[in-house]
Amino acid sequence: ASVAPRTATPAAATTTAATLAPATLSIVLPTFNERDNVPVLVERLDKVLVGVAWEVIVVDDNSPDGTADAARALAARDPRVRVIRRVGRRGLSGACIEGMLASSADFVAVMDADLQHDETLLPKMLATLSADEADLVVASRHVEGGAVGNGLSSVRASGSGLANTLARRLLQVDLSDPMSGFFMIRRREVERLAPRLSAQGFKILLDIAASARGELRIAELPYVFRERLHGQSKLDTLVALDFLGLLLSKLVGDFVSVRFLMFMMVGASGVVVHMLALFGGLELLGLEFQSAQTAATFVAMTTNFYLNNRLTYRDRRLKGWRALRGLLSFYLVCSFGVIANVGVATLVYEENAGRLMTGIAGAAGAVMGAVWNYAASSVLT
Ligand code: GDD
Ligand code: MN
């Protein structure tokens, strides 16, 4: 009688009354277009977790396929299913963090919702934590008995191998499978580490292990990564850049954020684009310096906007018309930067002609513009 009732249909409330006890284990399922997979997984969890007070927290980033609705249909029948629908945000790590922090259970697990992770491992993971043998249990494909199976293409497999080596060498994370997206942890550790975690990228486990700096007792259990049945992987090439950002950020001891590092990487690429466009305009098109510099500035602004939208701010990416509006507003707020840029560059250029000075003039202008662009666009665009 002390259990607060949760919203459920009357029929469900009577049949599942026993499970309304507070959950011991929250299973966080990040989802993006997994409508067909979620009901299957929840059914499997129900079978494999008999005797455990569990709950599922689906964290959906407003999937166009209606995953959130499918999950809510489950929740209407089974109060152990909870749904968080995030609008205007994207990102696997961020979704996992949000799901874990929405739990009140002693233990939280994170697993893919696409049935690639072996749910039959969960009871053993829970037993390891309950017996206080570890603070974090990782399901690993790279310990004796584990395997990648047919779950990864050969390109993905070798990329994953390289990333593992880098993570272990550079971050001194003692994990055989630091990229695993399948783990269970004591919630109080998540609460403690949360302020150090980056919401960007795919590498939530690596982030947790690196941020803990050896403070966590870690156990690894083998599992076989399964093939995906419905839908497709969301891991793309930009995820590799995310990973580099996380490596750098952790290497410098969280002194700078992943986002700032991304912005710098994009900025650096913008300078290269700018210089190429400038010399292209001068040498190939025979433009006057001032026109070539103006054109180069717009070219670099456009690529910077594109890359920042795809990468630096991918968790709140602008799409379609919003992207176009974003680009125009970016041009607009940067127009003062453009004037400063072209002004400075032309001034330097007119004082000293010559190839080297042309380069320096262009670069000086680009740097001026970049500083302004960051300040103005981060506030306005
Ligand atoms: N909420 C949310 N937001 N969920 C997402 C997002 C997102 O932006 N992107 C992906 N997901 C969900 C998917 O719906 C799926 O449930 C899970 O996260 C994993 O995504 P996949 O797209 O299936 O990733 P994968 O199979 O290529 O990669 C898996 O294996 C990698 C190791 O090779 C993941 O577990 C990775 O974390 C892991 O590094
Ligand atoms: Mn997958």
Image (cartoon, rainbow, N blue to C red):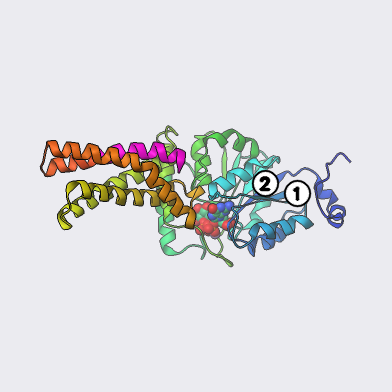
Residue furthest toward the bottom?
Answer: 229
Q: Which of the two residues, 168 or 309, is positioned nearer the viewer here?
A: 309
Q: Which of the two residues, 201 or 118, is positioned nearer the viewer here?
A: 201
Q: Which residues are magenta?
A: 364-381
Q: Is mark 2 within 8 Å of ligand 1?
A: no
- The answer to whether 288 appears left or right of 216 in the picture is left
Secondary structure at badge 2 equals: helix
Quadrant of the image where one finds ligand 2: bottom right
The tag on residue 349 is: none
How many numbered marks appear?
2
Q: Which quadrant of the structure image shows residue 258?
A: top left
Q: Residue at x 19, y 40 (%)?
A: 346
Q: Which of the two residues, 326 or 56, is positioned nearer the viewer here?
A: 326
- The answer to whether 316 appears left or right of 121 in the picture is left
The quadrant of the picture occupied by the N terminus is top right
Q: Residue at x 13, y 35 (%)?
A: 351
Secondary structure at badge 1 equals: loop
Tell me, yes or no, if residue 141 can be seen here: no
Q: Residue at x 59, y 50 (%)?
A: 87
- The answer to whether 277 appears left or right of 321 in the picture is left
Residue identifier under label 1? 52
Residue identifier under label 2? 126
